[in-house]
Amino acid sequence: MKVGFVGLGNMGQPMARNLRAAGHELAVYNRTRAKAEPLRQQGARVADSPADAARGAEVVFSMLSDDAAVEEAVLGGSGLVAGLEKGALHVSSSTISVALSERLAEAHAKAGQRYVSAPVFGRPEAAEAKQLWVVAAGAKADVERCRPLLEALGRGLSVLGERASSANVVKLSGNFLIASMIEALGESFALARKSGVEPQVFLELFQSVFARSPIFERYAALIAHEQYEPAGFKLKLGLKDVRLVLEAAGAAEVPMPLASLLRDHYLGGVAQGRGDLDWSALGALAAERAGLGKK
Amino acid sequence: MKVGFVGLGNMGQPMARNLRAAGHELAVYNRTRAKAEPLRQQGARVADSPADAARGAEVVFSMLSDDAAVEEAVLGGSGLVAGLEKGALHVSSSTISVALSERLAEAHAKAGQRYVSAPVFGRPEAAEAKQLWVVAAGAKADVERCRPLLEALGRGLSVLGERASSANVVKLSGNFLIASMIEALGESFALARKSGVEPQVFLELFQSVFARSPIFERYAALIAHEQYEPAGFKLKLGLKDVRLVLEAAGAAEVPMPLASLLRDHYLGGVAQGRGDLDWSALGALAAERAGLGKK
Amino acid sequence: MKVGFVGLGNMGQPMARNLRAAGHELAVYNRTRAKAEPLRQQGARVADSPADAARGAEVVFSMLSDDAAVEEAVLGGSGLVAGLEKGALHVSSSTISVALSERLAEAHAKAGQRYVSAPVFGRPEAAEAKQLWVVAAGAKADVERCRPLLEALGRGLSVLGERASSANVVKLSGNFLIASMIEALGESFALARKSGVEPQVFLELFQSVFARSPIFERYAALIAHEQYEPAGFKLKLGLKDVRLVLEAAGAAEVPMPLASLLRDHYLGGVAQGRGDLDWSALGALAAERAGLGKK
Amino acid sequence: MKVGFVGLGNMGQPMARNLRAAGHELAVYNRTRAKAEPLRQQGARVADSPADAARGAEVVFSMLSDDAAVEEAVLGGSGLVAGLEKGALHVSSSTISVALSERLAEAHAKAGQRYVSAPVFGRPEAAEAKQLWVVAAGAKADVERCRPLLEALGRGLSVLGERASSANVVKLSGNFLIASMIEALGESFALARKSGVEPQVFLELFQSVFARSPIFERYAALIAHEQYEPAGFKLKLGLKDVRLVLEAAGAAEVPMPLASLLRDHYLGGVAQGRGDLDWSALGALAAERAGLGKK
């Protein structure tokens, strides 16, 4: 396939390389031209602008650092909307806002072009090793059309529905889950250290008990299915344990704002008569706060 | 070994059974006597009180629901402190407060008895299937003495230091990590649903990308080793992504208090000149809030 | 009246002095005896223990630093329960826990003694200047009996119901309101400073617009009467403004966790269809979280 | 003076009327023309667009509902930038974002026009009664020029510095302070109600003790001057009291997220060795989180 690639940073570079390695004809663009050199040596054409990279391409990827960069490269004077042929497809892999993804969808539609949102999970090493996980959303035919390309980037592909921006929601949610776990770990290690537990010991335990166990998976399933009864571990016991955490943290002088947040949510659950549901019913409380009806 | 077991609830029952199955001589006590019947049929002696269960035993386990129950069973009139012989060992497996664990350690020491704190990770099904993970702390000789018993309960054993209550800190931290992940999932699913992403699809993605990947493990290691440079993913990019989450959540009308908390921490990190560290440096911020010095 | 006074710290000292100045016969006790000297010179008897201070007294005040000190002085060996005559009255003015206040009520009742909880609002200077505000709760007859004494302490007295501990709830709530305002001010000043507004200018504005205006009073009335319609200022406009605060704070790199909390609550209100109520309907949301039914 | 006024909602209407009453010549514009009728009857000219309202005016006010409305009315095709004469002055009284205020400043400067940001504190009744408080910022000469007009709107005027958007920061901060107090009151009333204290009683107490006392003013001064020593009430005592609040709230099953936030901040203060400062040192913690150096 004739493929364009815009953005050769530490993610885009190895992604483009993998597309080239899969045998596709490549035109690449990067603001700092020097970064395009390695790909030129592998046979890629070096373009002068995003529009130039789009010249004659069936599919053009963009992989840039933020909303501003994507706006410029897509909607700017010599951007993809200006350069893509009618019917050609833009695959946006950057981590951008849901709002911008929706604006891109509109702009391409107006110009008679196609748009798939396909952000990726994984760090540069994963991109290098073809271990990214791709999440794609857009019109079914469009996703199918670029499927071979998406599969050339990583170890797996999840296809969501027709609304392109839903892939951005999912990507952002994924980063939110990671950051949440980091915060939880940060507070836990602070408590452990102030309680005299060696970080290394706590780490080994985390690795043994949690890291690759199906535990988080199981809770995700309970929330996805809104299956909070019968309780495996009751919400009121969750409250009890979080209270004990906060007591220990108070004694050791460790502020744990995430634990405080959990305490307030569990306490609200109990106050509202939900104490006998499973403690994963935090999911029900989150849904209700958002105005999603009780099941 | 001659072993006592106090508390035959849905955790204690299978734990006691596994000890019996491993060939130990068992005396059991439960407030509601009927629950002791299955174990009687497997050859256990049914005691009239915790103290009676401790009669002649080298080691007595307790597995009860909360601080109040443990206080009564250990420090009460016919409790373990009253019943254990000098030199005999109490293994406390209940999820109790750090403060109570410290009081138990003192009470046993005063009475010339030994004390190991050994809470467990796992639900009743795991107890049944000998799949618990045990975390033990106490004097080295004491832990060694009951090691065969602890190993008969589950799939793994982590031994912490001499301070018994550190096992309680770790157990509570573990439950805090799970509850944190539940909250993060709850908020994510609410956002996904209000953004038109099917919960089942989001679940499958979570299972593919996160559930058994080494991702959380890797972040735990960075925090344990306080290794926030060089950044794999910069803190200021973490801020960017959490902001995008909150923007999307604002547009979809989904309150995400955990995301707000993350935003404030990341923003503080940037304001304090830490934006180029790895985004796992939330761990550094948590440590500093707790008065733990910068490394 | 014959009055005892236990606890001559920087609050108790001027309070006792005011009782003496009002003409009452005084017996005082303080752990560090030297602090009793000024009152001895004004004619007070210096007692050897709380019980000794209670000897022959109709009413004994206690004003101590925390739960532990009060527990010792009231329930301890030579404490007030041991020393008060049947029918004599203990007025507890310390800022203590609701739970301890309830235990004191029980202990005195059991001993045939009377108990009024009467914490005070005001700093040492206010105590000195007879400008405290006293909040009293307990049996009506008991409160009436000590009313002249309570009125000798300050500029005002509020009488709550029969349940003594409700005065403690109110006192703690008052301190919570002050601390909340401090936090809000702290975050505001940080934002103002990082936005180039001189703290002194912001202070003067606060003094002009808020400090003694009826504004907070009016909102308190709306919440007390659960009168959220018609809206003076709509909840959805509250959301808009808090969002603008967070945007400005984001740009200036000022973490404002209280603003984040407000944003999440307002956003939840809008998501749940309450956007057209008055923005004081945060009070309705707080009540519902606590399981108090919708009006 | 020849004055234009754009936006005749429930705030703009009485503001324009007060300008007219002060004897100024008025041209008014409102999207829904019917709302201009009362002012027409008082002698105002009814304009067809913001630009038309600006025709021949020395000063034009705008008072609209949000950023979008202001953007349209100022930067739109027949907006103020298009209509104001060189040297004429736009006074923006709407509650808008800091970012938009800065864009307006730029746009007017580019067009050779003047710009003062002058948001107001007060509800429609206050506007009616000439009781608004106006906060103005902009070039000194410009503020002086419109001073008589600003003084005709309310009971007071605070003048900030040259940077127009600082008035918007201050206005938003003011609304943030009110919303914070509402949240604090909401949580307090929930606690009071669940503790059996009548809302009316709690309200009367609030009115007596807090509402018009100098208490909040005093704390604002401590924070403005960063004067956290000597402590009037120590931060560690603040921690104690907030802990007691949370204990009472836990027992009564009342989630109090703002109290949790305070607890974490106070606990961090103590952990970092600041326990002996005044409890208003929450202000110092907020400043440090924002990267403002320790004094």
Image: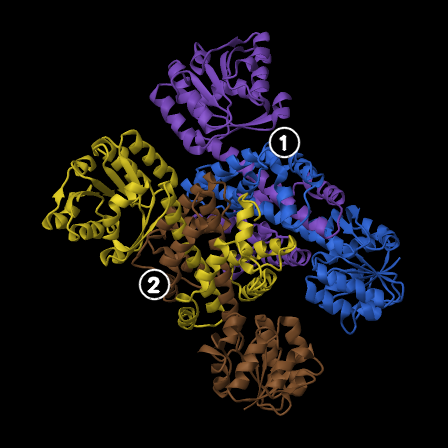
Chain colours: A purple, B blue, C brown, D yellow
Image disc number at residue B231: 1
Relative image position of residue D87 (x, y in whole percent): 24, 34
Please give left or right for residue B213 compared with residue D76 in the image: right
Corner quadrant of residue A241? bottom right
Residue at image location 54% in from the left, 55% down from the top? D282
Relative to D104, residue A94 above or below: above
Both on one chain, marks 2 and 1? no
Please give left or right for residue A50 compared with residue B8 in the image: left
Relative to D239, residue D72 above or below: above
Residue nearest the observer in this picture, B40 or C56: C56
Relative image position of residue B120 (x, y in whole percent): 73, 52
Residue C82 seen in render: no
Name the subunit of mark 1. B
Quick one: SS at disc 2?
Answer: loop
Residue nearest the observer in this picture, D5 or A230: D5
Residue B115 seen in render: yes
**Residue marked by disc 2:** C227
Relative to D134, residue B229 above or below: above
Name the subunit of mark 2. C
